[in-house]
Structure formats: C-alpha cells, structure tokens
Amino acid sequence: MKRQYKLENLGCANCAAKMEHEISKLTWVYSVSINFLTTKLVIEFEDNMKERIQTEIEKIVHKYEDNVILKRV
Amino acid sequence: MKKEIQKVILSILLYIIAILVPANFIIIKIAMYLIAYLVAGYDVMIKAIKDIRNKEPFGECLLMTIATLGAFGAGIYHTFNPVGDGFPEEYAESVAVMLFYQVGELFQSYAVGKSRKSIADLMDIRPDYAMVFRKDILEKVDPFDVEMGEIILVSPGEKVPLDGEVIKGEAMVDTSALTGESVPRRLYMGSEALSGFINKNGVIHIKVTKEFGESTASKILELVENAATYKAKTERFITKFARIYTPIVVFLALGVAVIPPLFTREWLIWCMRALNFLIVSCPCALVVSVPLSFFGGIGGASKKGILIKGSNYFEQLAKAKIVVFDKTGTLTEGKFCVQNIMPVGISKEELLWIANYGESYSHHPIAISIKEAWEQIKERGEKFHQPNISDIREISGYGIELYLDGKEILIGNAKLMELHGIRIQEAKEMATIVYIAMEGEYKGYLSIADKIKEDAKQGISDLRAVGIQKTIMLTGDRKDIGEEVAKALGMDEVYTDLLPHNKVEQVEKFLQKKKNTESLLFVGDGINDAPVLARADVGIAMGGIGSDAAVEAADVVIMQDEPSKIAMAIKISKKTVNIAMQNIIGAILVKVVILILSTLGIANMWMAVFGDVGVTVIAILNSFRALYTENL
C-alpha cells in the first residue's frame, strides 16, 4: 500500500537523502521518496506493516533530525 | 529562526570583544574565544554527540565539531609552544569557522524557506471555501463537502472552487494560474468554469460537474507536488555521489594527517590541513541545489501553463532533436470550418444562405460547419428571411436535393452536379468542396476544411530555433490534405493514411533510428493517441485543460492550446538542466580546488568554510533562476 507523510521542520537536505536511503533499505519497503522542498515522504510498503509503519519511519527520521514532526497526509 | 539570529549576533559580539582583549591577558582572551565558540556552536556539538550515538561517523555536525575543536586545540598548543611573537591565530579561526558555518546555515534555511514559499504561492490555486446554495440559503463550506449537481456562487475576487457549468450571470475570469494566459476569459451561461479561475468582476452561479478531488485545481496541484517524485538522472547521480563523497574526503583527511608527517615530522601542520578537509566534506551544496533547480524549473514552467510531470523529463526535453506531431486537434483545430465561399453570380451571403437552409436538417460535421459560418454572418446583423423548405431528398454519397421557396436546389459534391448535368468550375483547394446549384444553374461552392491553428506555424519555426532537427507529422487523413498542411507549416516529413496503431509503429521506427543522445517528443491532443504518448521519450498533450485522458497519459501537459509552447518547454528545460549542471560542476570544482590548496598549505580555514556554506548559498541562489521564465 501507499502512504504520504509530511515531514514538518525538515531542515537539512543531506539528512533527507540519508533518511530516504536508510528507509529504502528496509525489507518491507517497496519504494520511498522524500522531497526536501515539499517536505513530503511517499512510501509504498507491505500491507501487514501498516500498524507499525509510522513508528518505524519516525525512528529513522529522528535519528537524523529529531525535531521533525511526521504527519500523515 | 529569530533565536538563531540572536545567537549568532551575540556570538559575533563576544568574538569582537575577544579580539579586542590585549594579548597579555591570555586567560581572559582565551576564555572569551571559548565562550564565543560555545555560544555559536553548542547546538552543533549536541548534534555531534548524537551522531556518535547513532554510529554516524560522517555526520556533518560531528565533522564540523572535530574541525573547530581541532583548531582550538592547535591554538592551545601554540600558546604553550609559541612559534612567533603574536597571539596564536587558531582561536580566532576556530570561532570564525563555527560562526560562518552558522551564518551559512541561516542563509541556507532562509533560502530554502523562500523557495518553499514560492512553491506554496504556486499552489495558490487551491480554493479555501465554496459558497453553496442549500435550501435557498447561501452557505460557506469546505470545497470538499460540495457535491456534484449543487449550485455554487462565485463573487468578484473569489476563486472558482470546483469545476462546473455557468448557469447564471456573466464574468471576466483570470485563468493565468492554470494556463499562463494573461488575457482574461469571458464566462457566460453555458461556459465551462474550471476551479482555479479567479473571478474579476461579475457574480456567477455554477452548477458543479466534478467533485473537488477531481476538479482541475486539485488535479494540477497533485501533479506539481508529485512531479519531483520522479527524479532526474542528475538528481539520482548526486544522491549517490553524496553518499560516497563524505567518506572519501574524510579518509583523505586521515591520509593527509598521518602520511606526510611520517616523513616530515610536522604533525600539527598536517593535522590542521586535514581539518580543512573535514570542513568541505559536506555535499550540502549539491544535495540542496540540484533538486531545487529542477523544482524551480517545474514551478517556472507551470507559470507558463506547462505542466512537467517529473524532473526526469527536463533532461529528455533538453536533448530533444525530433518532434512528432499528430495533425488533427494538435496542429489543426480538429474541427471543420468553412474556409472559402466562392459564389458565381450571387453574393457570398446569398450562397451561404442557400447552403445553410439546405443543410438545416442534417447533423453531418460538414452541415454543422456551414451552420456555424451562417451564425457568424447573422451576428453581423444582416436580415435574411426564413425560406419555405420542402421535398428534401438526401442522396447518400452525393448530397441533398430540395426546394427553397419553390426553387430547386442542389447541394453536394461534383458527382451530384454531374448527375444533373450541371457544368461547374472544379475547385483546386485541398478541402472538402460543397457545390451549389439553383434551378439547374451553378451558383458556386464552399470549401470546408480543418483549420490550422493560429500559432502552429510559429510553433514549428520556434522549434527549429531551439535546435530541433526534424519535425514530423502523422495523420490519419488523406495524402493530399496531410501534405498540404505539412507544407503550409514547413514541416520536414509527413506520414498519411495512418490508423492509430500505425502511428505507434511509425514512432517505434523513429525511436530505433535515433541516437541515444537524442530524444523524441510526441505531441498529441490525448484523444486516441495515448499509446503513442506513452511510447515516445516525452509525450506532450496539448490543450490539457479539462481533458483528463490527456493529463493521465502525457509526461508534459500544455494547458493552453498553443503549439508554440513546445519550444518554450524545451527552452525552460535547457535552462533548468544548465543551472543544475552549473551547480554540480561549480560546487565540485570549488571543493576540489580547496582540497588541493589545503594540502599545499595555501588555503586556510576561512577558505574551507567558504567551500562549504559559501558554495551552498551561491548554488541555492543560482537554482532560484530556474523559477524565472519571463525572458526566454
């Protein structure tokens, strides 16, 4: 399934690239794209992860920028 | 942001005080530098600690902290082991590097904020509310909650919130947000109103025909926002490059710090040089500015009414060499229209009067075009009486015979005239010819053809000016008509009598023949040519406004029905790709030069800081240019 999140306070482009890379390596993620300028994250992933996806992404995002707020759109 | 600025200003003041403290108060001077350093860099240091915890050895903050603390350490070393007379310079350098880094970050976030805002402005077509009639009361609601079939009211100054049909009132609307066209359009009863139009002067009632999510404004917003998801090759290259760049530079730094001193024993000098490496080790300039360039290009293009559905298409458009056009609906209006009226012995109006009433019972496209021509004449206010029509006989493949006010009329092709033994002057035009005779006497003919779009010729010659080597037309029409249009437009090749699947085959052939460094564009109107749009390197749909099929199938959508916009799209793409390349080459070059100069001991820390944040800011400012498409 596919979901979109808004990454509020995303401030560092290189961090965004690193987040994208790390998320893309998760086995249950088909594809992920972070747009630094619209601060949008688009992710396609295995259906059975839909309960946990937000916390899983948050973990990775906060590793690089801890003041980012993840909002589903 | 405000807090950050205050912090930087405070640190600068402390820094100046530290410089002013006389060199004999060593402890106070060092303490002042240290305080200035901590004020400027405490948050960087906190993040550095996080980097360590996250096992992220190449974190920007960590490297910056190592570099500046290293310099500070060198200062302390020189305080106890002086080399010259003066106070060690490293303290000032260390603080300055941290300060400049922070100032640069501020600039960077300002610039990013600014570009995010210009994107948001672009998105300004999103309507905030809709005024809807419910039980005769006007209610202000979220456009999401309006259903199809409801009646909405749009007052002057308001945006049309949903697509629909005008059922009452009249107004001039500004369509520029959707089409890039600055001349306002008049809406009246029966016109189609699209969400995103801005009402300039009248009050109009609109019957909603599409839900908000399906309305034009939402569609366009979705398209522009998602455009950057399809990354350009250059962008993907930069992301990959960024991942290896930092580790490479850090290992080089280690090399510089360790290897030469093994021979020279000058440990401190080489360590200082290595610290410069760490400062320029962030690929930020590239990671921010390259996507920003493409995003600017998408924004700039959409201001011109050109929607580019992904950054990857910029590169394809920029290297376009062949443009294949569909004829009908793309280069021509796709609608029959009376081109010439050639009467014999009567006036043009009389001839058209006969044709109009003669064809008045027919629904054939030819008959419709004649009626339209007649309506135009009537609008000029000339008076003609309504004739008595009787004994209509339609002879399939020939035309019509009838009586108008008791006179025998023949309207049809040359064969019909021949059948009745009427001598005609054969018309030489490449069009459908309708001959007319009255009471056995030839009265003239009308030529009916699909009209070439006004700026089609300009569009083709513009393409040549932007480096297109070949323009090709594909059409399902007859050979003579197709060739005539191609000649009139000055196109290089034309292929006629093609069925839709033949068009795909033709395009396949062109694709096989072209070089890899070139790309092929296909321009269609989205009707019947979706497979070709998908097959070409870039599929461009013309007049996409309101046509969902075209928007779905194409890679680039030209909102207004103007062939000249294709050359514009190519120009914008070339500019965008150029800007991205300038940023890449410029940033890498500066960094490499600074690395070399640092190794040679020529570059100091100041230059290294410029190589980091200075370059980033310049690259961001440069990518802003992609947004401006006014003077192309």
Image (cartoon, coloured by chain):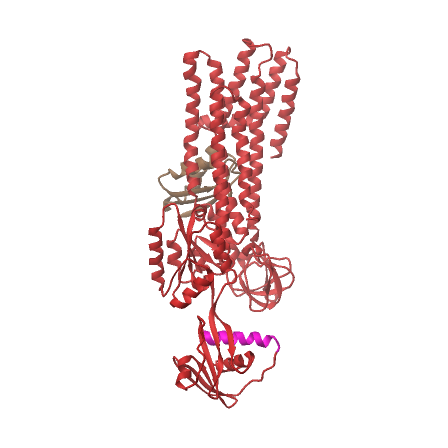
Chain colours: A brown, B red
Task: Examine the rendering and report whether any part of residue A39 can be seen.
Answer: no
User: Going by the image, does B542 lie left or right of B188?
Assistant: left
Q: Nearer the viewer, residue B216 or B315?
A: B315
Range shown magenta: B362-381
What percent of the width, then of the height, locates residue B234? 43, 40
Task: Report the front residue among B89 and B493.
Answer: B493
The answer to if B192 sits in the magenta stretch is no
- What residue sits 47% from the left and 43% below the top? B577
Is B364 covered by the magenta stretch? yes
- Which of the 4 quarters of the picture holds residue B82? top right
Q: What kind of secondary structure does the magenta stretch mostly adopt?
A: helix
| Residue occupying image coordinates x 41% and y 65% | B482
Residue furthest out toward the bottom: B406
Residue B573 location, x and y as percent?
Answer: 48, 47
Residue B524 seen by the camera: yes
B361 above or below B264? below
Q: How many marks?
A: 0
**x then y, percent, for residue A61:** 46, 36
Name above or below for residue B519 compared with residue B579. below
Task: Please state the horizontal and vertical placement of residue B146, each as a whole percent of the image.
Answer: 54, 60
Name the side, left or right, on which A46 lies relative to A6: left
Q: Quadrant where the N terminus of chain B lies?
A: top right
